[in-house]
Amino acid sequence: MNVDVDGQISAVSRELGDRVHEAGELLEMRISQVYPTTAEDLWEAVTDAGRIRRWFLPVSGELKVGGKYQLEGNASGTVESCDPPRAFTATWEFGGGVSWIEVGVAPEGDGARFTLVHLARVEEQMWETYGPGAVGVGWDGAFMGLGRYLASGEPNDAAEAEAWAGTEQGKLFTRLSSDAWCAASVAYGTDPEKARAAAEQTRRFYTP
């Protein structure tokens, strides 16, 4: 498995902000990337269970408004809204906690932009320790997997991806992703020293 790590990290936009939600004041993490495909194809890739498993994780359940879903070995939740072929929202339930995701697809230039917003309550200890990279590095990996799948048309090999994470190239990806989320955190207003310390903790957590 060979990845243009610098190119992939640079292709992704990352932003943090605040959001007033029915659940209270939440942190908004926004990540997006333009892919060389049509908006229709990209929408299908991120909403069809058979295609989601090719770049992310196997998913079961009912992928419709009100339906419950389960990502194998990861989060579950409920689809709250869907406006095909543009957007959907869902809860993201993991480890006893609940957060929310908003997915958007839109044509852009000769391709299509995939935007994912993750809304979460900021638990002080987790935020102080890991910062946004705790979630962001994982999403960076998913965005990379989506790009590889769209480029080749072939499903990603989970075992190969897991092994790659322990290589020097994989470790570089984790470090650069952590650094990128650190920069987003500083731009959001986090003290730079605290942001760098959190990014280092995230890098250690994700590096095998």
Image (cartoon, grey):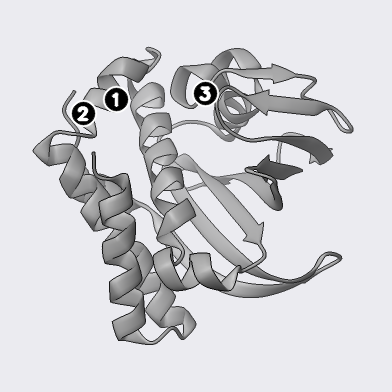
Q: Position of residue 48 (x, y in %)?
A: 65, 20
Q: Which mark is residue 164?
A: 2
Q: Earlier in the sequence, mark 2 or mark 3?
A: 3
Kindly check if marks 2 and 1 are in contact, taking CB atoms under 8 A apart as contact.
yes
Residue 10 visible (yes or no): no
Helix, strand or loop at mark 2: helix
At a point 38% along the width and 80% down the height, the residue shown is 186
Viewer-nearest residue: 28 or 195: 195
Tag 1: amino acid: Ala
Q: Position of residue 102 (x, y in %)?
A: 68, 49
Up-down relation of residue 182 to residue 58 (above or below): below
Quarter holding the N terminus?
Answer: top left
Disc 1 from disc 3: Cα separation: 12 Å
Circle 3 sits on which residue?
57
At a point 45% along the width and 73% down the height, the residue shown is 128
Q: Which mark is residue 161?
A: 1
Which image quadrant is residue 118 in? Answer: bottom right
Q: How many marks?
A: 3
Q: What crowding class fits label 3: few (fewer than 14 Cα within 10 Å), some (14-19), or many (20 or more)?
A: some
Q: Earlier in the sequence, mark 1 or mark 3?
A: 3
Disc 2 from disc 1: Cα separation: 5 Å
Question: Residue lying furthest left in this view?
Answer: 168
At a point 13% along the width and 34% down the height, the residue shown is 167
